[in-house]
Image (cartoon, rainbow, N blue to C red):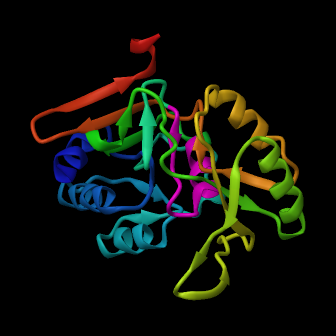
Amino acid sequence: MKKKCAYEALKYIHDDMIVGLGGGSTIGYLIQYIHDNKLNIKVVTPSLTTANLCLTNHIQVLPTYMVDHIDIAFDGCDEVDLNLNALKSNGAIHTQEKIIASLAKQYVLLVDESKFFEKLPFHHPVTLEVLLDARFYVIQEIKQLGGQISYRTSSAKDGYTISDNGNIIMEAIFEEVNDIKQLDHDLKHITGIVDTSLFVDKVSFVLSVDEDHIRKIEKEKFQ
């Protein structure tokens, strides 16, 4: 299914584009298809794994700070809904991903049907990149919003998980979110939160695949 989704995404990529690529195995297949079709593009990515895979396949990689636009960007997610709200919680690179999403003329999510919902269920936490000095303030504010918050840790490293920007990663669990846009607004206005893994008004469309079909899901079709 992931190969099928990657091959569908290839149709949107043309020579001389600047293309944003996230991480994951679907993106890996897309990189292989770009190489096999000898497309002349440049890539920006927040993922070191993706960057290395591009270089292995002789695809030029640019640092994000060197580009003023991205023609189209592709990424995965943990959850996405009919209004194209999405959660991208697991990688802890959501700040860089959101910069790429903001630069992109089109930001496209590649998912299988198990990650698509009528409304975000918040089965995954909202991941927060937080300035160290603000951690206790952020904890208080998240609790005021009805969230349960914890530090992200890893068995591979002592202490807290640290972002590529040198900030701590925290996780906020919310239940029964009635207004996703309001939650997004409230989180963005907490001093010390660099950014969150909740993507609102960023996704252009979704390519969703199951064993038999590929769907292109656009927000306006459901409004």
**Residue 106 as seen in the image, left or right of residue 68:** left
Residue 182 percent location from the top left of the image: 71, 28
Number of callouts = 0
Can you see residue 112? Answer: no
Q: Quadrant of residue 130?
A: bottom right
Residue 67 sits above or below residue 223 on the image: below
Quarter holding residue 193: bottom right
Determine if the magenta segment contains residue 100: yes
Question: Can you say whether 91 is above or below 97 in the image?
Answer: below
Q: Tell me residue 86's x, y (percent).
A: 50, 39
Looking at the picture, tell me which residue is in the foreground, 110 or 65: 110
Q: In this rendering, would 104 be left or right of 142?
A: left
Residue shown at the point (84%, 46%) measured from the top left: 190
Instruction: Give the residue displayed 68% in from the left and 64% down from the top.
Output: 150
* Residue 95 seen from this side: yes
Q: Which residues are magenta?
A: 85-101
Q: Is residue 22 magenta?
A: no
- Rendering quarter of residue 146: top right
In the displayed structure, 53 sits above or below 24; it is below
Residue at far left of view: 212
Q: Position of residue 98 (x, y in %)?
A: 60, 48
**Residue displayed at 33% across by 57% down:** 27
Looking at the image, the residue that sits furthest to the top is 223
Which residue is nearer to you in this view: 222 or 146?
146
Q: Residue 88: where, in percent of width, then height?
A: 51, 51
- Is 123 on the left or on the right of 160, as rendered? left
